[in-house]
Amino acid sequence: MKTTPSPWQLIRPYWSSEEKWRAWGLLALIIVLDLGTVYCAVQISTWQKNFFDALSEYQRELISPLMWRLAGLIALTTFCATFSIFFRQLLEIRWRSWVTEDYLARWTRKHAYQRIESARLADNPDQRIAEDLALMAGKTLDLGLGLLKNLVNAVSFAVILWGLSGSLPLTAIGLDIELPGYMLWAAILYAALGSWLMEKIGKPMVGLDYRQQQYEADFRYLLVRMRENAEQIAFYRGEAIEHNRLRNAFHAIRQNWRGLMTYTKRVAFTESVYIEVGSILPYLISIPRYFAKQITIGGVMQLSVGFSRLRTALSWFLFNYKELALLRSALRRLGEFDAVLRQPQVSGIRLVQSEHANLRTHGLNLQRPDGSPLSAIADIEVRPGERWLVRGPSGIGKSTLLRALAGLWPYGDGRIELPRGSQLFLPQKSYLPPGSLKDALCYPAAAETFDDAQCARALGLVQLPQYTKRLHESDHWEKRLSPGEQQRLAFARVLLHRPDYLFLDEASSALDAQNEDNLYRLLDEHLPASTVVSVAHHASLERYHQRRLDIG
Ligand SMILES: Nc1ncnc2c1ncn2[C@@H]1O[C@H](COP(=O)(O)OP(=O)(O)OP(=O)(O)O)[C@@H](O)[C@H]1O
């Protein structure tokens, strides 16, 4: 059973990684700069009282020093605010880089990416890695630092308000006591009430954001698939059905967006009422004390600024509700993905490295990922240099057997013993990476592994000499080369890599008999010591294989 990690478990790894000192150092620097802006805000509030008092008492000589002080405070606050953003962005990209590398490593390790796709364990891993990780780093920093700044602000202005607001006699409601610091209590009560109301009203936004991210990713995936399969879709004249499919995918986005609009409207309405009432409230509650001549007009101004600042600081949750919902949904998606990446490999078919020279299978039973049986494989023993042909009706599990031999199919039971030695698996349609033709030819090795002369020779042997001069040309080779040419290119790869074990899964199915013959003869001539296991339907290939494995 997979357990989804908590948000803290997703956030913590970077902060306890090898980069932790740099991360904490940057965070501390940002906090100091943010505290600088809070300090300036507190000083400006005192400045306002002094300024209005000086104006009301016609103290002209105080105006100039007050102006200089204001200029100094503005300069300091600008400096702190600017560099706080700068370092925050720096920390964000460092965090995102670290966590992206971590997820990429785990996603690509032990074929996790293939396991996830083959058993459909998580939707849109690309979106989770590209977007949710960026959201996690960016929003956690913004919201976390915002929360901290607001807490400091709240404490600073709470102290000011406590000192300024005096006591409220409660005689009006029949009590013979006075409430000290009543403005402070009013601000706290008001913010608490607003936050509670906001959570009540806005909670479904988390689920809506979650689905929005998923639908956007699904839509993008369909667009990319259409681009990648443009020619096949065009041959089938499949535009109308594709258009419909895309429209439906977008419809899901639009429907969900409707829901988001409804809740955003409610959240915005709550926020707006909260702000407007909150801006009038301090005047209403401080004016009685002004008329009682307990505070000056400057005092009223300072009180209302203090009240507003405290209320704003205490309203962090309320004002950031939309952002928090987005972060909560991104963390939920990442949590699921993280749990899938942590899931232990299914321990069905055991693939062990053997010290013997022969490849052996024992009691191999192939299943589908859902556990339903696929086929039973007779025990085989493949000696070095032997050529085996795997036969059986379509859908019986021939390709699945090769997947199991490659360690990509754990579903089932039994045991495979693989001797040491290099292996190469050639599917019907070989992957051609983006880049030059040489990149594609040398894959999965780097292009520099083989020199141009070796590549030219291999291309010549598979009857593709015309491409020798285009070795360094970059193109969409999977679209430029015909399927038969792609299969010949894959055989040229084999000639370059010279694997000890070669597994072919209908790797020459697109070729004419002459070319197919040529490729299998090349294997006999150039790789006589390699062990070859082929899955093929063409009867003509039987003469190149001495051994047979029939499935089904
Ligand atoms: N990831 C998967 N999830 C569920 N079922 C799968 C998956 N991959 C393959 N199968 C199923 O396993 C069965 C065997 O597939 P496999 O590709 O091994 O057949 P095959 O014998 O190579 O067929 P063909 O000769 O047509 O290539 C098929 O019914 C296929 O639908």
Image: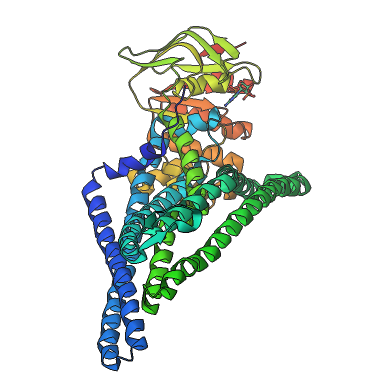
The quarter of the picture where residue 528 lies is: top left
Q: Can residue 434 be seen in this view?
A: no
Residue drawn at (60%, 33%) of the image: 514
Q: Is residue 354 visible?
A: yes
Residue lying at 63% horizontally and 49% vertically, measured from the top left: 223
Where is residue 497? Give x, y as percent.
38, 35
For the point 56% across and 46% down, which residue is it?
Answer: 478
Question: Up-down: is 272 above or below 492?
Answer: below
Image spot of residue 426 (x, y percent): 50, 31
Vertically, is 462 above or below 180?
Answer: above
In this picture, residue 552 sits left or right of residue 412: right
Please tell me in which quarter of the rendered image ligand 1 is found: top right
Specify how the rendered protein is coloured. Answer: rainbow
**Residue 516 or 265: which is nearer the viewer?**
265
Residue 373 x/y as whole percent: 59, 12
Front residue (pair 297, 311): 297
Q: Nearer the viewer, residue 455 or 438?
A: 438
Q: Residue at x 50, y 31 (%)?
A: 116
The percent coordinates of residue 445 (x first, y second) are 37, 40
In the image, 72 versus 324, the foreground residue is 72
Asked whether, in this view, residue 48 is left or right of residue 329, the answer is left
Q: In this view, does 325 lie to the left or right of 221?
A: left
